[in-house]
Amino acid sequence: MSADEEEAPQPVQGEARPRISPESADALWWLARWIALPLVVVIAAFYAEPLFRGEPKVEVVPTVLRQEVHPYPIPPDAKIAPLAPPEVPRAPRPSPITLPPFEFTAPQTPAEIAASPLAQPKPRYPERALNAEKEGLVRLRITIAPDGSVSDVVVVSAEPRGWFENAARDAVMRWRYHPSGGTISTEVEIEFKLD
């Protein structure tokens, strides 16, 4: 036998086992007292509960409940009123009104285009003029672009001056006309009146 292959020491009969340190013994006692013991009590109570419980206190009544189900609509021999409303006599439908075909002709001349705007929003009455109870008339020269929008507005006259020009100019810039393919210049008047 070589020095490397020495036998492991065998415990001798009657020799004491290794002792547990006092700190380890305290830790084991704490675990047993606060974790293991309550866990054993809970498990025992869970499994012992059916032993302490008596027979269930359920009263069994030997009765059969019968329910009748009818398909809708309710049969005519039923004694209850049907849920459907009674038939109401209805008048025959009138025949649809036929109108003669409508032919839309867009304005062709510059005068027709200027005379029939597509959209003509009204101006807002100026607050200052409303409080002063003023009325007025504004004359404007407008330029209608080839696409029908108003591209330029020039105030020609205003009576009284300094009250209504901005409101009239802002409103006319939102007017829309039929597209004409060319530029049209015309004059318009906007009258501000209190009702």
Image: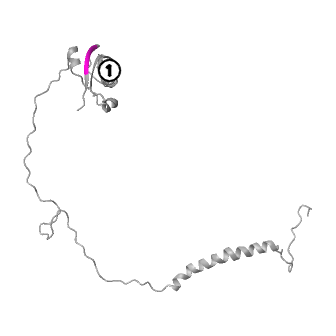
- Identify the colour scheme used: one colour
Work out whether 28 lies above or below 129: below
- The residue at the point 27 percent across, 14 percent down is 184
Q: Which quarter of the picture shows residue 177?
A: top left
Q: Which quarter of the picture shows residue 149?
A: top left
Residue nearest the observer in this picture, 136 or 73: 136
Work out which residue is located at the far front of the displayed protein and give it.
132
Location of residue 81 in the rendering, given as x and y in whole percent from the top left corner: 15, 67
Location of residue 189 in the rendering, given as x and y in whole percent from the top left corner: 25, 20
Give the residues drawn in magenta, as a range.
184-189
* Label 1 Cα neighbours within 10 Å, binned few <14 / some 14-19 / many ≥20: few
Tell me: 18 left or right of 110. Answer: right
Q: Which residue is mark 1?
A: 161
Q: Is residue 24 covered in magenta? A: no
Q: Which quarter of the picture shows residue 186?
A: top left
Q: Main secondary structure of the magenta part?
A: strand
Please indicate, yes or no, whether residue 108 appears anywhere in the rendered image.
no
Residue nearest the observer in this picture, 37 or 176: 176
Work out whether 65 lies above or below 179: below
Please indicate, yes or no, whether residue 69 appears anywhere in the rendered image.
yes
Location of residue 9 in the rendering, given as x and y in whole percent from the top left corner: 87, 70
Numbered disc 1: secondary structure:
loop
- Is the N terminus in the top left, top right, bottom left or bottom right quadrant? bottom right
- The residue at the point 22 percent across, 71 percent down is 68
- Is the C terminus in the top left, top right, bottom left or bottom right quadrant? top left
- The residue at the point 33 percent across, 31 percent down is 127
Residue nearest the observer in this picture, 4 or 139: 139
Mark 1: which amino acid?
Arg
- The residue at the point 71 percent across, 73 percent down is 31
